[in-house]
């Protein structure tokens, strides 16, 4: 089966919103053996949507649309779909009750006309319930073609994909199975990672495809396998992963959608340890990432943003002479910050960051991008020096990532 993905919205065309929906849907369709042959973005115009639908309907087996299902005047996907399939709108009581329930959970008990309009659905469509928002999705089957329409809000679209669309299309698909797995690495540049894996990649690319995807937080290694069935595809992915891990296990912190903060959270919870962080150049980013994980209150004791020298001295107990003698961006101060936050919090582990995020603040001996990351537990206190680059926001991201990576390796007993 071949598919086209149509994402709808002026915001996509003008670059106001990054089109993450298309990449997500494309990945999910590939995993169940449906080949994505075309991805198109169109604006919020009925005529453009209908024109693209006609082309897709003539050339592909599966057409997935996202966006333009809201209650405002610029949401025209529903009316375009009705014109294309020559059907009218009818009130669906199940959808109306779902809208009421969704809004009631947010303290809104009275529905306005815009809310009620969400329950008007195409008469010919099968309804895909939306438990993450108010706009339902629609499914049409006609002349052997499948058309699926979903909201553009990523959370709502993903919920529908995971809870209905993937299973539905899996039963319809008779093609080969495509399986992907992403191994996430950090703490090693792409060129060094490839050098370690060059021979392995040449070996395993006889039965799969390997891609290296670098970012500010690390390098993702994507494994893609196409096989006659799901079982064979899974086995080949497992074989490729095993060979990669044999060479670079130290740098792999997670797979697929796992984030580093999730991994360290699980490790801290399993070991019954608490952590506290003292941040200067990262400005609370480490604490933010840790507390993005549900249940982080079990292991996260506190986070302190000690940006000024005064804060480092008054709150964390950093000796004033250390700052005078070595400067705030130094091994000595990073160590004192990590040890200070650990002691005042009573946590098992303290982590700290101090650096020059840029673009100003550099000296001849301390360039933009210089960051010291401190670690302290009851047995040892140390700090590591890193030089990340010239971009302020990337420096914050990379420093937060490396702080969490140092913590992961310490928890697992891996050499830093």
Image (cartoon, helix red, strand yellow):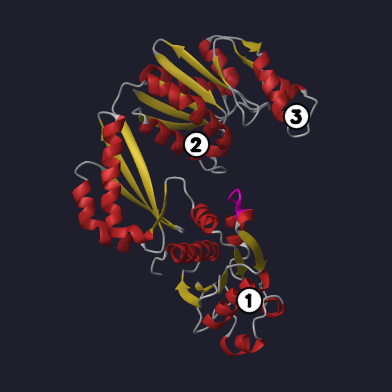
**Range of residues picked out in magenta:** 291-296
Q: Nearer the viewer, residue 12 or 271?
A: 271
Disc 1 and disc 2: Cα gap in Å? 44 Å
Question: Residue 171 placed where, x, y %?
Answer: 39, 20
Image height of 98 relative to 84, above or below:
below
Q: Which residue is at 63% across, 25% downward?
A: 135
Q: Nearer the viewer, residue 239 or 24?
A: 239
Q: Which residue is at 53% across, 58% downward?
A: 268
Q: Which residue is at 49% across, 15% downward?
A: 140
Q: Give the secondary structure at mark 1.
A: helix
Q: Is residue 397 visible in the rendered structure shown here?
A: yes
Residue that mark 2 sits on: 21
Image height of 119 relative to 213, above or below:
above
- In reply to whether residue 189 is colored magenta, the answer given is no
Q: Confirm or deny contact between disc 1 and disc 2 (CB under 8 A).
A: no
- Numbered circle sitting on residue 300: none
Q: Name the quarter where the N terminus is drawn.
A: top left
């Amino acid at each position: 089966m071949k598919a086209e993905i149509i994402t709808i919205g002026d915001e996509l065309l003008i670059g106001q919103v990054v089109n993450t929906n298309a990449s997500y849907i494309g990945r999910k369709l590939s995993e169940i053996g449906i080949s994505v042959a075309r991805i198109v973005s169109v604006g919020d115009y009925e005529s453009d949507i209908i024109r693209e639908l006609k082309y897709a309907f003539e050339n592909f087996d599966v057409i997935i649309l996202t966006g333009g299902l809201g209650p405002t005047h610029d949401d025209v996907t529903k009316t375009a779909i009705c014109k294309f399939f020559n059907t009218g709108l009818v009130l669906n009581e199940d959808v109306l009750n779902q809208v009421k329930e969704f809004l009631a959970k947010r303290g809104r008990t009275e529905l306005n006309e815009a809310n009620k309009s969400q329950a008007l659905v195409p008469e010919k469509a099968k309804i895909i319930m939306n438990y993450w928002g108010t706009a339902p999705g629609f499914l049409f089957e006609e002349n052997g073609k499948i058309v699926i329409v979903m909201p553009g809000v990523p959370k709502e679209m993903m919920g529908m994909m995971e809870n209905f669309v993937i299973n539905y299309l899996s039963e319809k698909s008779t093609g080969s199975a495509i399986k992907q797995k992403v191994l996430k690495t950090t703490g090693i540049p792409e060129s060094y990672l490839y050098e370690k894996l060059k021979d392995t990649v040449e070996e395993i690319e006889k039965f799969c495809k390997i891609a290296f995807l670098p970012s500010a937080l690390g390098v993702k290694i994507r494994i893609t396998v196409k096989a006659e069935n799901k079982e064979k595809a899974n086995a080949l992915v497992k074989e490729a992963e095993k060979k990669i891990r044999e060479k670079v296990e130290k740098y792999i912190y997670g797979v697929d959608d796992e984030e580093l903060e999730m991994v360290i959270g699980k490790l801290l919870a399993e070991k019954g340890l608490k952590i506290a962080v003292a941040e200067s150049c990262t400005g609370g980013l480490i604490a933010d990432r840790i507390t993005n994980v549900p249940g982080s209150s079990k292991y996260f004791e506190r986070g302190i943003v000690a940006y000024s020298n005064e804060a480092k001295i008054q709150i964390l107990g950093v000796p004033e002479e250390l700052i005078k003698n070595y400067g705030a961006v130094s091994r000595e101060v990073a160590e004192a910050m990590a040890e200070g936050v650990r002691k005042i919090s009573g946590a098992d582990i303290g982590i700290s960051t101090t650096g020059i995020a840029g673009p100003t603040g550099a000296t001849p001996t301390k360039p933009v991008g210089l960051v010291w990351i401190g670690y302290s537990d009851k047995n040892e206190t140390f700090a590591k020096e890193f030089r990340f680059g010239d971009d302020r926001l990337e420096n914050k991201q990379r420093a937060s990532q490396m702080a969490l990576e140092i913590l992961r390796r310490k928890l697992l007993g891996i050499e830093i």
